[in-house]
Structure formats: C-alpha cells, structure tokens
C-alpha cells in the first residue's frame, strides 16, 4: 500500500511492489533460480506452495500493483514440473492463523474449491501437508488445490496417504495466461478439440514463451 493513504477520506488504497519484489522477480525468476539450484544439488523432491485462483485472469490478486502474481506463480509451477525433479505442488486456499490438525482437509483441482464454502485453510495445516508430502510416494508428481472444512464439521485428517491418493495426478490444469498485449486468453477454451496430451504440450509451449 502506498504511503500517505488516509482511510478516513474513503477510497481504496493503492498497492505497489518495492523494487526487486515484483511477482515476476520473486514468484517466477526467484523460484526458477531455486529450482535450478536444487536440481544442481541433487535434491530428491521439491515441495512448492502456491495459491488457488490461477485459472482466473481477473482474480483480485493479479490486479494488486498490476503484478499478475498468480500468472507468474503458475509459470514457476510449470517450470518445476518440466525440471524432472519429483515434485508436490500445493495450491493453498485463503490462509488462516488458526490451530492446525483439527479440520478435515480437502483436495481439488482447477480452483473447483473456490466455488464452494470451503476455500480457506490454516497455515499450520499447509505446513503439515508439506511435511507429510515428503513421506509418501503418493504425493510425488502431484499438483492440487488444498482447503479444509470448517472446524467441527467432518473428520480431522490423519491419513495423509489417502489424502495424497485423492489428489490429481501429474501437472494438469486449466491454464490461463496473459499475452504481451495485456489481453487474457483461456487456453483451455481454445484447445477443447485437442487431446489431453496435446493440451499439455501446447500449454508448456505457451508458458515457455512468456
């Protein structure tokens, strides 16, 4: 938020990124450098925490400071998926500062959970899923959305092997990109006549061109 904003005068605060902190630099270039370093060091698995909302080009997070943060996050995810390193990509819902381990966790794909009332998750639960992902083969080569039911509903998740088994296989999502002209294109809609494998290859080519 830019300095000098006075909420008593009404209006909306103007958000901006400090130099060196733009999403392209942090969420794309920075993560790419980390992935390259991990690969060079022989790391056996990378757990990457992202964010739900990446299928919607008009998501409010993209408009903050004109940073298109979710687009750059997805580009880094694709780079990781192409790296050859076993990965687990966790796209968390709205993060909450609440106690972990007391809710039923939910996995989904392509922001389906954003269309429900179960769109949030405790930070502690995200951290636990990251740790558990290192222990189960079922978590490798997976990319999934993560949220939870409200406390007091459902059964608190304890069987993480079962949770990872439910998560979508491989890196497959409804890709939304931004062209150089600033126009948004839903590649999924343009590719609906292609096979799944053809869609994946086309998605990779487009992301690599950004």
Image (cartoon, rainbow, N blue to C red):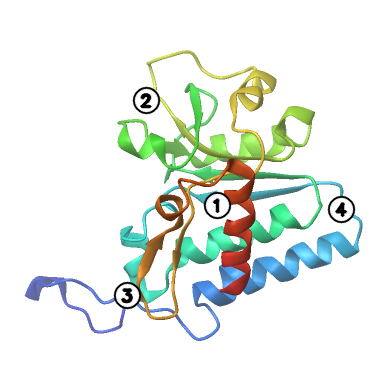
Measure how far apart labels 3 and 4 are at the Cα level.
37 Å
Which of these two is toward me, 22 or 184? Answer: 184
Measure how far apart labels 1 and 2 are at the Cα level.
21 Å
- What residue is rendered at 16% in x and 77% in y? 6
Q: State which mark lies toward you, 3 or 4.
A: 4
Side (left or right) of 81 relative to 68: right
Q: Quadrant of the N terminus?
A: bottom left
Residue 50 badge = 1
Q: State which mark lies toward you, 4 or 2.
A: 4
Disc 4 target residue? 43
Q: Are marks 4 and 1 in contact (CB under 8 Å)?
A: no
Q: Quadrant of the C terminus?
A: bottom right
Side (left or right) of 158 relative to 52: right
Disc 2 target residue? 150
> In terms of secondary structure, where does tag 4 sit?
loop
- What residue is rendered at 59% in x and 42% in y? 196
Q: Residue furthest front?
A: 193
> In terms of secondary structure, where does tag 3 sit?
loop
Q: Earlier in the sequence, mark 1 or mark 2?
A: 1
Measure how far apart labels 4 and 2 are at the Cα level.
36 Å
- What residue is rendered at 62% in x and 18% in y? 158
- What residue is rendered at 59% in x and 33% in y? 168
Disc 3 target residue? 15
């Amino acid at each position: 938020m830019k300095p000098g904003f006075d909420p008593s005068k009404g209006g909306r605060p103007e958000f901006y990124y400090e130099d060196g902190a733009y999403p392209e630099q942090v969420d794309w270039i920075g993560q790419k450098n980390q992935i390259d370093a991990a690969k060079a060091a022989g790391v056996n698995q990378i757990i990457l925490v992202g964010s739900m909302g990446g299928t919607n080009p008009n998501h409010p997070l993209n408009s903050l400071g004109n940073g298109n943060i979710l687009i750059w996050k997805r580009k880094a995810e694709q780079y990781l998926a192409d790296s050859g390193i076993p990965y687990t990509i966790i796209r968390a819902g709205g993060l909450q500062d609440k106690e972990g381990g007391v809710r039923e966790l939910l996995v989904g794909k392509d922001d389906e959970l954003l269309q429900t009332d179960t769109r949030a998750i405790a930070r502690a639960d995200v951290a636990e899923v990251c740790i558990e992902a290192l222990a189960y083969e079922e978590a490798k080569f997976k990319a999934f959305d993560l949220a939870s039911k409200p406390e007091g509903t459902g059964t608190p998740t304890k069987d993480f092997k079962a949770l990872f088994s439910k998560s979508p296989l491989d890196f497959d999502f409804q890709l939304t990109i931004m062209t150089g002209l600033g126009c948004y294109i839903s590649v999924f809609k343009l590719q609906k006549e292609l096979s799944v494998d053809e869609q994946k290859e086309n998605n990779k080519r487009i992301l690599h061109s950004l």
